[in-house]
Image (cartoon, rainbow, N blue to C red):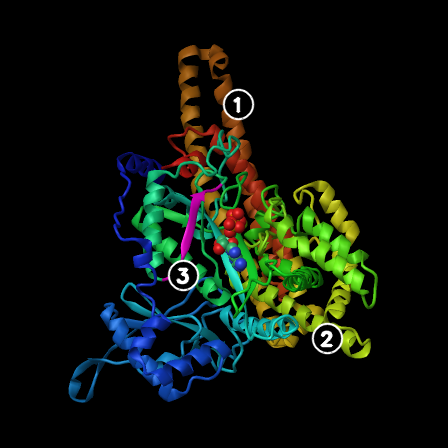
Amino acid sequence: MQSLRKKSLENLLYKQARLFQNDEKYSALFGRNVFSKTILENYVNKDAFNQIEKAIFKGSEISRPLADQIAVALKAWALTKGATHYTHWFQPLTGGTAEKHDAFFDLQLFGKPMENFDGSQLVQQEPDASSFPSGGIRNTFEARGYTAWDPTSPAFVLGKTLCIPTIFVSYTGEALDYKTPLLKSLQSLDNAATEICKYFDKNITKVIATLGWEQEYFLVDKALAASRPDLIITGRTLFGHQPSKGQQLDDHYFGSIPSRVLAYMQELEFEAMQLGIPLKTRHNEVAPGQFELAPIFEEANLSVDHNSLVMDLMRKVAVKHDFMVLFHEKPFEGINGSGKHNNWSLATNTGVNLLSPGKTPMSNLQFLTFFINTIVAVLTHEQLLSASITSASNDHRLGSNEAPPAILSVFIGKQLTGVLEDLENVSKGKLSPEEKTDLKLNVIGKIPEILLDNTDRNRTSPFAFTGNKFEFRAVGSKSNCAKSVTTLNAAVAQQLENFGREVQILIEEKNMKKDDAIFNALRDNLKDIKKILFEGDGYSEEWKKEALKRGLSHYQNTPQALKACVSKKSISLFQQTKVLTEREAIARYIVDLKEYIYQIQIESRTLGDIARNHIIPTGIKYQNVLIENVKGLKEIYGKDYLKFAEVQIKIIERISGHIQEINKGIVTMVEIRKKINEIKDEFEKASAYCEKVIPFLRDIRYHCDKLELVVDDDLWPLAKYRELLFCR
Ligand code: ADP
Ligand code: MG
């Protein structure tokens, strides 16, 4: 039988780009399938609308009669959009999204058909939680979980289904998803930040975190991907020799977008716009076959939902264009992997970005307060923040000259470094009027000007200040943004609370004026944060040494990094900010370790199977061709045959050598896996997979890739890097 690879390549020759036609303006499409507040206003009375607004703004309860009213409105609206089903849409700890559809269709007494949906169905459902990761929280006798409506993220119609964003908790109330702790962290951050804002502006009654993610991804031809069980099963290529041309010419980045890809992007945008996802940017990324998209930033909870939703859409639209979209952080060895940059800031109900300098010295002091406290928070919880972005797949990407290493540092730029130095030099205690004027005019008064032309950006930093926001760049492309954003929110919330306490003490016990107290409390932190501020090349070897000297953590792999999730410091952060209970934090740690174990286990099994069932047989097939050839030469030339068959014989031997090594590797790897699988403790088991199994993945691959170079191209069963990466 002809190999799948050959068939796929032939198919490609006849393929034409699927055109996509849309003549409507994006502004007309935007939010068409979203049950927005404006739409709600048309469906319910003023009193109900105000109550819902209050619930969204301050997190107050929505009563059952009110929920019934909203349900009636939702159903009426969804039916106009052609919806036949509804679902509670949630984000379990698998990293994806989950949905279970129920029809609006119902039968009344005497069998009269109708469309039905009420408040109870809107507010709560009880999916079986037993097949979602729970880290041991779920009691075996109680498999039920609850999904509960999140009114802060609007419902939407996707295809013919009304999707209601929900949280997902166990029967006993513990969070089993990403949204629950995210919402709690946002609440905690709101409380702490609003308190601090009162020093500057009494009109500030709410602070929200804003998030703008940048999503990197690869597109490969669906038919070629089908010839790669490793891509299909693990999301990355476990084999594949480097192509002669990779990304060394830098000719892909920001290049003209291939027409087949552009058609894909256009259809994706068409779908996303209707769902209210404000996509703004699209471009080619560094690696061949790699692209990026980014929206306009939004309130963090909504933005997280939109990232999950867009990833789902990307998969679905890709199928229509005969593509497979890859979110794995490192699908191809030797070529840049994909990340997700989380741009994060804080905004007030008065429309102020707290990480953007303002027009007056006081508003700049406000900026500095949030700026410095965020850095302190990152320093305090650097280990936990690193743990929030770690995974088996992101381990491949971090620290390999394409992404920041697994050391957390903060880049703020030359100008702001200067401002912090000036601040540090102001004398301690109460400031004299002259000192204050000088500080206001010459230090903080100048911030907006210096930031205006602050163009220095450091692409090697994992956590960089970029003028009006921080950008967390170490996040993996595959991960749910909520994980890192929740941790950051919690860390900043805790720090702001501590800061508020310090300021209060200075005011009450040291009799300081408000701004003196703020200056002093800020200055107290400036020495400490130098430890984590770094302006140089984050990819360099010197930085690794320097970071070690500074006492910053540099974890080597995911199991090591994850330990921070259950440290005393982290648990107390989660408890203090009410983001997670100790039980929940431990459960999540177990979920992460298990995910790591399974991922490496699956990779190891897949690699073994492909090497045995595809690669060794292919090597033997080609070896047989060569043997036939040598036999033929012997027949023709008799004793002199070696003169003509020398190369062939060398290749025959080389093939045997690689086959032996591959087989030996697999046999030993399977033995080791068996032993490791007996380990009960999850951390020990994950570490064993990391230290003892991963090296085999590399060794076996090495020999398989060597065979790829030797064996007749016609026989090779797996699509090669040059085909996967450069197909259009
Ligand atoms: P790049 O990092 O590629 O240069 P930009 O800095 O222009 O791109 O923007 C990247 C992302 O940052 C976008 O998604 C944008 O919406 C987001 N962003 C801009 N301002 C904020 C903010 N105040 N809060 C959160 N995200 C923001
Ligand atoms: Mg960016």
Q: Which mark is residue 501?
A: 2
> Crowding at label 2, few (<14), some or many (≥20) Cα neighbours within 10 Å?
some
134 within the magenta span: no
Please name whichever residue, 621 or 683, is drawn nearer the observer in this view of the structure.
683
Q: Which mark is residue 309?
A: 3
Q: CA distance from mark 2 to mark 1?
A: 76 Å
Q: Do residues under tags 2 and 1 come within 8 Å of each other at their CB atoms?
A: no
Q: Which mark is residue 427?
A: none
Highlighted magenta segment, given as a residue range: 276-285
Tag 1 residue: 650
Q: Quadrant of the N terminus?
A: top left
Q: Residue at x 33, y 57 (%)?
A: 27
- Label 2's element? helix
Q: Position of residue 154 (x, y in %)?
A: 39, 70
Q: Residue at x 27, y 38 (%)?
A: 15
Prevailing SS of the magenta stretch: strand
- Label 3's element? helix
Within the image, what quadrant is residue 595 found in? Answer: bottom right
Query: Image check: 458 left or right of 64?
Result: right
Please name whichever residue, 385 or 6, is drawn nearer the observer in this view of the structure.
385
Residue type, mark 2 in image: Arg
The label nearer to you, 3 versus 1, is 3
Residue type, mark 1 in image: Lys
Within the image, what quadrant is residue 722 found in? Answer: top left
Mark closer to the chain start, 2 or 1: 2
Q: Do residues under tags 3 and 1 come within 8 Å of each other at their CB atoms?
A: no
Residue type, mark 3 in image: Leu
Q: Position of residue 695 (x, y in %)?
A: 61, 46
